[in-house]
Amino acid sequence: MSALSACAMGLFGLTAAPASAAVIYSNITTSDVSGGTANGTSGFAFCAPNCPTQDVGAAFTPTYSTTLTDAIVRVYNAGAGPTHADFNAFLFSSDPANSGAPGTELATLGTAITAPGDYRDAPLTIPGGATPLLAGVQYWLVLEPTNDNSAVSWEYGYTPTAPYSNNFANGGWSTPSNANSPQFQIDGTAPEPASLLLVGPALIGGFFIRRRRSA
């Protein structure tokens, strides 16, 4: 095996290392927006078909390009029983023509997800589907009721606040606001900085070894 081939194989091993996990955004807490203990009375309720609010979105903006691994939300059953607490989760783009409110659906993250029965339950994790996210681009995590009997409440967040928007049955998405944010966390992956820094030196070293042996 040539030195250059060995170098290339070593380089492959370095660049193929698993990416590290990272928190892209989080305001998950045990407190509501007023700073008190989460009590199940403060949150965005979304239901269908007769609720004014039928979908709720929360915005986030990655600071670097990454891959969405999961989303975590603090939600609970606001209906009459377990069969009334199902919801769907989506990733949406932002619509510049509507003040940056949710625009186009980019990915389905989950369907018929059952919200916990009590507001004191642990936050719920939703797989991210390995969805790519670009640096500096605003995205929306959107939750909607699964069917006409669903009623779910998305607990208010405390800090940091993030833009939220409601999809009203009679008027579309509302202008984004930071007044009260739903509690959520976005997790993603990031490339290992060390492996990227070793790419250049490894290739250069292999080149000079090959030249010396050929001389």
Image (cartoon, rainbow, N blue to C red):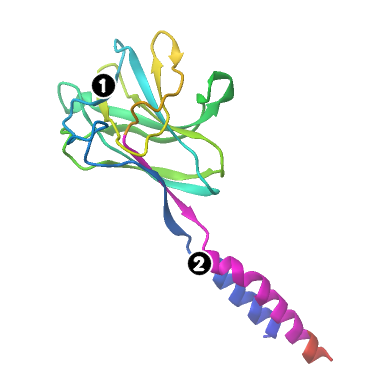
Q: Residue at x 56, y 41 (%)?
A: 136
Q: Residues within 10 Å of mark 2 (few under 14, many from 20)?
A: few
Of mark 1 and mark 2, the one earlier in the sequence is 2
Image mark for residue 119: none
To which residue does mark 1 refer?
Answer: 150
Q: Quadrant of residue 46?
A: top left
To which residue does mark 2 refer?
Answer: 17
Q: Secondary structure at mark 2?
A: loop
- The residue most toward the top is 170
Dot 2 amino acid type: Ala
Residue 132 x/y as whole percent: 53, 44
Residue 32 x/y as whole percent: 24, 33
Residue range of the region highlighted in magenta in the rendering:
183-210
Q: Of helix, strand and loop, which mostly describes the magenta segment? A: helix
Q: Residue at x 78, y 91 (%)?
A: 213
Q: Residues within 10 Å of mark 1 (few under 14, many from 20)?
A: many
Image quarter (top left, top right, bottom left or bottom right) of the C terminus: bottom right
Magenta stretch containing residue 196, yes or no?
yes
In the displayed structure image, the side of residue 205 where residue 45 appears, left or right = left
Near-viewer residue (164 or 3) = 164
Residue 36 x/y as whole percent: 18, 34
Image quarter (top left, top right, bottom left or bottom right) of the N terminus: bottom right
Q: Quadrant of residue 59?
A: top left
Q: Residue at x 15, y 33 (%)?
A: 118
